[in-house]
């Protein structure tokens, strides 16, 4: 063998154990996505890290009859740096795809073919429908979407909310309610994080904003009454920025899909809307689209059968959610997300609080 000037071979990406052809064959058969055929070969087409997870696009080749079976899959596993810290989030997303998604109309979320978790190791995985060829993100994060894209996104979000709106299974077989004691304990934890957050920021957190946080903490029990009323609530996404929605590519007749459900739960529906607009968008963009998107959201709720919820109640809930979302940057700071995320979120949500007069709620 020649030495010294030979070309070094590239090492192919390492296939995870869940990508074993035998495992995938069994999983796809159980999901009724494969009949008589079998997975013969699996290749890694692409892989990337998100903030808290690792995404692998798998290519599949079959032996035998495989008409209609997926040619590619998305494998979602924990990000190595957050595997232990955020293992609960992975298991929580798993519960969404295995328990809630099958009860929802098709076309709202990607299809899930398989999912498992290991409590001892913290490992988990999801095998999801690959929509790469038919769908795309509206924009590159953190560029806001166009008006038409935003309308499509909010329409789909309203569609998901309408499915679970005041659903009798909420808190029974779907999700859990936080008790008033749970809420109080969470605020106590938040207050501890906030004290450290404020100390670290020093003069970068103004006295006006410090007063706002203190008033929110002091009045949290009263403000929590809206949630504890258990009226006009639904399953919320919990991380509903516009880059967690896949839009059909040009020329593709399909629906918008929502993904990344590790923070789903029962809550006031406007929590998702406030997170999408008040936390993610600077004032000019938010002010241009906020009203029209709230109108579209409300119209979609009515079209999907939601009753007894007024347009005025939506506005009130939206302002309530925006106020509560001043806590979000602190929680993000507490789990060591980079300042590029939480600092910008802090600035944007504070401007929304001022624009919408949310301090009046205190």
Image (cartoon, grey):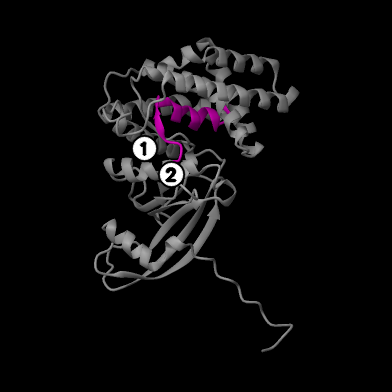
Q: Nearer the viewer, residue 22 or 38?
A: 22
Q: Report if residue 148 lies within the magenta region.
A: no
Q: Nearer the viewer, residue 318 or 228?
A: 228
Give the answer, above or below, for where 200 lies relative to 340.
above
Q: Position of residue 123 (x, y in %)?
A: 48, 51
Q: Which residue is at 45% across, 40% downward? A: 262
Q: Position of residue 54 (x, y in %)?
A: 52, 52
Q: Nearer the viewer, residue 26 or 140?
A: 26
Q: Which residue is mark 1?
A: 156
Q: Which residue is at 48% across, 29% downward? A: 289
Residue 29 is left or right of residue 24, and the answer is left
Q: Earlier in the sequence, mark 1 or mark 2?
A: 2
Residue 8 is left or right of residue 183, and the answer is right
Residue 309 is left or right of residue 258, and the answer is left
Q: Which residue is mark 2?
A: 91
Q: Nearer the viewer, residue 243 or 59?
A: 59
Residue 67, numbered circle: none
């Amino acid at each position: 063998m020649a030495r010294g000037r030979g070309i070094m071979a590239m090492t192919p990406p390492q296939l995870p154990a869940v990508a074993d052809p035998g495992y995938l064959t069994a999983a796809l058969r159980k999901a009724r996505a494969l009949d008589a055929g079998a997975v013969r070969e699996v290749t890694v087409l692409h892989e990337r890290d998100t903030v808290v997870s690792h995404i692998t696009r798998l290519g599949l080749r079959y032996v035998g009859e495989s008409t209609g079976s997926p040619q590619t899959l998305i494998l979602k596993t924990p990000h190595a740096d957050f595997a232990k810290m955020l293992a609960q989030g992975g298991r929580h997303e798993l519960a969404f795809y295995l328990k809630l998604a099958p009860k929802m109309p098709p076309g709202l979320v990607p299809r899930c073919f398989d999912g498992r978790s290991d409590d001892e190791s913290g490992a988990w995985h999801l095998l999801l429908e690959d929509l790469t060829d038919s769908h795309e993100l509206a924009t590159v994060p953190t560029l806001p979407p166009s008006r038409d894209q935003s309308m499509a996104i909010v329409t789909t979000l309203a569609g998901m909310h309408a499915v679970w709106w005041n659903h009798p299974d909420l808190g029974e077989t779907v999700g859990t309610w936080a008790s008033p004691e749970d809420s109080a304990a969470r605020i106590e934890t938040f207050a501890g994080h906030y004290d450290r957050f404020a100390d670290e920021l020093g003069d970068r957190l103004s006295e006006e904003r410090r007063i706002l946080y203190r008033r929110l903490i002091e009045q949290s029990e009263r403000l929590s009454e809206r949630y504890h009323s258990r009226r006009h609530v639904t399953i919320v996404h919990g991380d509903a920025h516009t880059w967690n929605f896949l839009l059909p590519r040009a020329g593709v007749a399909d629906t918008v899909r929502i993904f990344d459900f590790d923070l789903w739960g029962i809550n006031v529906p406007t929590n998702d809307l406030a997170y999408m607009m008040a936390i993610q968008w600077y004032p000019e963009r938010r002010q241009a689209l906020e009203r029209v998107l709230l109108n579209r959201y409300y119209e979609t709720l009515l079209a999907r059968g939601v009753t007894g919820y007024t347009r005025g109640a939506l506005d009130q809930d939206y302002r309530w959610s925006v106020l509560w979302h001043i806590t979000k940057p602190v929680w993000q700071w507490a789990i060591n997300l980079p300042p590029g995320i939480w600092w910008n979120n802090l600035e944007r949500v504070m401007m929304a609080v001022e624009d919408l007069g949310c301090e009046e709620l205190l």
